[in-house]
Amino acid sequence: EDEEKENEAEIQRLEEQLSINAFDYNCHLDLIKLLRQEGELVKLRRARQKMSELFPLTEEIWLDWLKDEIKMASESSEREKVYELFERAVKDYICPEIWLEYAQYSIGGIGQEGGIEKVRSIFERALTAVGLHVTKGTALWEAYREFENAILETAQPAPGSVPSSEQQQMLCSQLEKIHMLFRRQLGIPLLDMEASYAEYEEWSEDPIPETIIKNYKKALQQLEKCKPYEEALLGAETPKLAEYQAYIDFEMKAGDPARIQLIYERALAENCLVPDLWARYNQYLDRQLKVKELVLSAHDRAVRNCPWTVGLWIRYLLAMERHRVDHSIISEMFEKALNAGFIQATDYVEIWQAYLDYLRRRVDFTQDSSKELEELRSAFARAVEYLKQEVEERFSESGDPSCTIMQNWARVEARLCNNMQKARELWDNIMTKGNAKYANMWLEYYNLERAHGDTQHCRKALHRAVQCTSDYPEHVCEVLLTLERIEGTLEDWDAAVQKTENRLARVNEQRAKAAEKEAALAKQEEEKAEQRKQARAEKKASKKVKKTRIGDKRKADDDDEGEWGQEEEEQPSKRHKGDGDGELLEEDMEVETGLFGRSGPEKPDRPANQKEKASTSRKDIPKVLHDSSKDNVTVFVSNLSYNMADPEAKLKDLFESCGEVAEIRPVFSNKGTFRGYCYVEFKEEKSALQALGLDRKVVEGRPMFVSPCVDKNKNPDFKVFRYSTTLEKHKLFISGLPFSCTKEELEDVCKAHGNVKDIRLVTNRAGKPKGLAYVEYENEAQASQAVLKMDGLTVKEHVIKVAISNPPLRKVPDKPEAGRASQFAVPRQVYGARGKGRTQLSMMPRALQRQSNPVAKAENGMVQNSPAASSEPPEEPKKMSNADFAKMLLKK
């Protein structure tokens, strides 16, 4: 009873969950499983019906459903419902087992009127659908022959009787049917073809015709070509996507449309939640076969399997339009797309734009007014309102910040409807949505006015642009002056010059203030960094003072300690915290061969035996040289523990698993302490490449960094980042995790919502967790469901946040280019040989960093520099007054 109550409660919970999100695939599966277990046949039938309306069902689900319905079907009316269910089942996927079950079930109705012809019709459809299946097609052919043989047996006359001419004719006709089945089968590459050929030889009283033998041998040759791909599929693990893709490529080269379609269908039956596979299949059908029923069926199944993928919906709408489907059906399909539950706000913009394009193509713009035009305008208005209300409420953004839909609406009104008044109203609305500060938006409006409006409104738009633009005011100023130079009067010219001068003066003043503020902040950061550095030095010195004996005096450093290092390190030194006392070790820019600079200030004395030991260790340490010609067989290992004992021996044992190690060169400081990094040289290049796989492996409690050996003096831009920085719809980003959460514990939480392929806990350089993780699922559907179920979940009294992985782009430091210094850049601190910081930042506003070349004209809102301007560094800009700046703008 307790178990029944628990199941009832779980059924109620699942039903409530589906009422909230009907597209929860796993929730449907769980509900059907529980209802079947409880024997709730009415609810079970209803649950299956709802799921089948939203998703194509898998072969297993259909077979369970069909078997349950067959058990309950006793009357002829109920048998008809089972036939209808079979018809729905064979449309979802091309599955040999379902077709075979369908044909065998139809044999049960052979006694009804037209029963034999109905069975033959189902068998013929089955052969058309899956008769070419290399591994499973034989079963259908044999079942069909057995059925025809049974018919032949019933047509045989009684022993001793003489058949009539009518019976004789029927016998000959039935024998010919079986002959034709054998001949058709032997012309198709199927497994166990030899057994079918031997069976035909034994069954046939006449010799097999030469044409049939020729076709049989040709099919055998083709089978030999297919066997490697079939064997690869048999040996591969689910989902076998790579193996199927190789098979598809093979069939595409062969060029048989029926076989290409079949292998795509086989791949989709096992990879039904892979949107890219559906997209490639639909593209092939759209461009090659172009059969309406086949194309639309494939598109329909694609959006039912992957409803979250907006690209599949757009392709479906285009296919329906291409095959001239009724307008009401297309509109209904678009409404389904809006309810599909896309995972990005921009997806809704794309589907709306596709539908609006379709409506626009229906309009006859030669007429002043029409029903289609009014529908188009109504749809534009609804799209704007939908993005503002529905999408913004869900995603906290409309997905259309630049108002592309309204821009297209304005273009339609201006160019196709000759309604500039409406277009201007739309552009006024666009500018009120935060776009007035962007020069490119104003120039788009200006170009529209230029093409379909008049000079007065062009001038008005540019004057507003000069006043409002904050990103590139020079652009719009230049366009305004160009307009007045060509078409304006003297009064217009004077007004434009005065307006641009005043605006640019204010802009330069604002930029100067911003630069001063940034410089002040940078100075504060430098001072804070210096204070922290001094505090660390004082703390370190105080610790060493405690260890020295009172009265000891420090001897002068050896001469070799005061010398400058002669060699620069080829791999950048990496500082990190030591494992002992947790303090940051500062060695004053040390490299492999010694100090890269003068020795630091005098330090407190240490015991005599320690000084002697340190002096001896300094003399015994050889210089670590690296041959850059061996970079391809060498890896650079860093972030190791400073306290690692005998790093050469320990690392050799670790890296020998990748290949034969030629040499390991750990780097030590002048005092004999391990610097935490080394070079590992292999005998072969492939061993070095394999060693990169040990990156982030934990060694003595710290993640070891393994990277290619690259001289950064010669390749300053070289950077290795092993993880993707783009949107990954099948991967989740989880934040707010407790630091004590392990990979296994997180996997237990995540695997309830799908198959987890990989979990990566984000750590710092010391290997300590940061409370962040990336979880990779098999497909987008599982990831999206996990977001819905896990976001806001409590894990060890921590509320976690879960989202689709979309990391920001990694910032690459900009190189100083001619005339391109950023006015808001934070000063980058560069250290020279003496370790002293210096700031390299020009405080000159960007607008004044002009080059000596003539100012390029603005085209389409962008200023194009001449080649000379981009290749030569600019001269030091001079201070300019407002009058000088105006002369520079007016210079031709």
Image: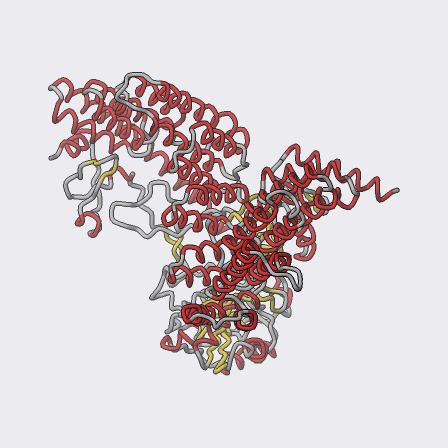
Q: Residue furthest right?
A: 1
* Rendered view: 243 above or below 452: below
* Rendered view: 15 above or below 700: above
The residue positioned 59% from the left and 37% from the top of the image is 53
- Compared across the picture, whether 438 is left or right of 474 comes to right
Residues 788 and 801: in front is 788
The residue positioned 36% from the left and 61% from the top of the image is 716
Residues 468 and 123: in front is 123
- Please state the horizontal and vertical placement of residue 708, each as a whole percent of the image: 44, 68
Residues 562 and 162: in front is 162
The residue positioned 37% from the left and 75% from the top of the image is 628
- Please state the horizontal and vertical placement of residue 36, each as a whole percent of the image: 75, 44
The residue positioned 44% from the left and 61% from the top of the image is 720
- Please state the horizontal and vertical placement of residue 445, each as a whole percent of the image: 28, 26
Q: Is residue 582 visible?
A: yes
* Rendered view: 446 above or below 103: above
Q: In this figure, which colouring scheme has been used for the structure? A: secondary structure
- Please state the horizontal and vertical placement of residue 537, each as a whole percent of the image: 54, 58
- Image quadrant holding the C terminus, namely top left
Residues 487 and 326: in front is 326
- Compared across the picture, whether 869 is left or right of 580 comes to left
How many discs appear?
A: 0
